[in-house]
Image (spheres, rainbow, N blue to C red):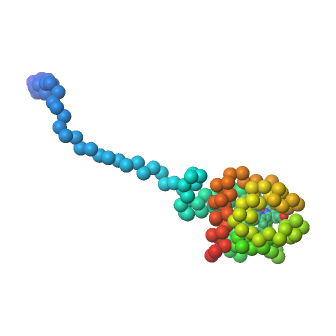
Amino acid sequence: MALSTIAIAAMTLNACGPPEPEGPTEQIIVRDRGAPDVVATGTEAPIEVGLLTVGKTAFEANCAICHAVDVGASSGIGPSLNGVVGRPAASLDDFAYSNAMQASGITWTTGEIDAYIANPTAMLPGTSMAGVMVTNAQDRNAITAYLEILGSD
Ligand code: HEC
């Protein structure tokens, strides 16, 4: 036992000569693709799927507490927003709109909705949609894209 331990120690010592020149090393180039870019950066056009994912999330965070979006959904605290893009304002029978909304003459485009959710009472004084302000323009853009898609099923 003791002998073989010494033999191994000696072999290890013998291996410690001058450093051998390193042979050719294999190069592995890893290209960093980064995380999938689902959020608009402001300079690049976001991919559609990412935009809708952001829109759904932002809608759920800012709007879903008052608005349903499912096909055939009833209005709640706010009118149903399924198919709202292209719809004249105040056109659902199952919702009691403000006088301001009924008299607005708006037909909802993504641009009109963007302006409305940025500051509802500034765009439409007297509207009963209060306490909602989506200050982030990218979130507004994603929300209106999401609403537009929902209207096209
Ligand atoms: C606190 C509840 C509440 C929240 C949150 C809310 N809304 Fe509303 N929304 C309303 C009410 C109430 C009305 C009706 C306004 C009126 O009649 O003046 C309305 C009306 C609307 C209309 C007009 C619909 C129509 O049929 O003419 C749009 C578009 C709209 N909301 C979009 C949004 C979006 C997008 C969000 C999220 C960013 C949002 N709302 C968040 C309560 C809310």
**Left or right of 46, for residue 126:** right
Front position in the image: 48 or 95: 48
- Give coordinates of residue 78: x percent, y percent: 79, 65
Residue 78 in view of the camera = yes
* Occupied quadrant, residue 143: bottom right
Q: Residue at x 17, y 37 (%)?
A: 23
Where is residue 135? Give x, y as percent.
Answer: 72, 51
Q: Is residue 93 above or below residue 12?
A: below
Q: Is residue 93 left or right of residue 152?
A: right
Q: Looking at the figure, which quarter contains the C terminus? A: bottom right
- How many tags in the picture? 0
Q: Quadrant of residue 62?
A: bottom right
Left or right of residue 146: residue 13: left
The answer to whether 109 appears left or right of 4 in the picture is right
> Quick one: quadrant of the N terminus?
top left
Task: Determine which quarter of the picture holds residue 148.
Answer: bottom right
Q: Position of residue 10 (x, y in %)?
A: 11, 24
- Residue occupying image coordinates x 17% and y 27%: 19
Q: Is residue 5 visible?
A: no
Q: Classify 52 as above or below 92.
A: above
Q: Nearer the viewer, residue 68 or 43?
A: 43
Residue ID at (74%, 69%): 108
Residue 20: percent from left, percent from top: 15, 30
Please identify the residue farthest to the front as the structure is shown. 43
For the point 72% across and 71% down, which residue is it? 84
Ligand number 1: quarter of image: bottom right
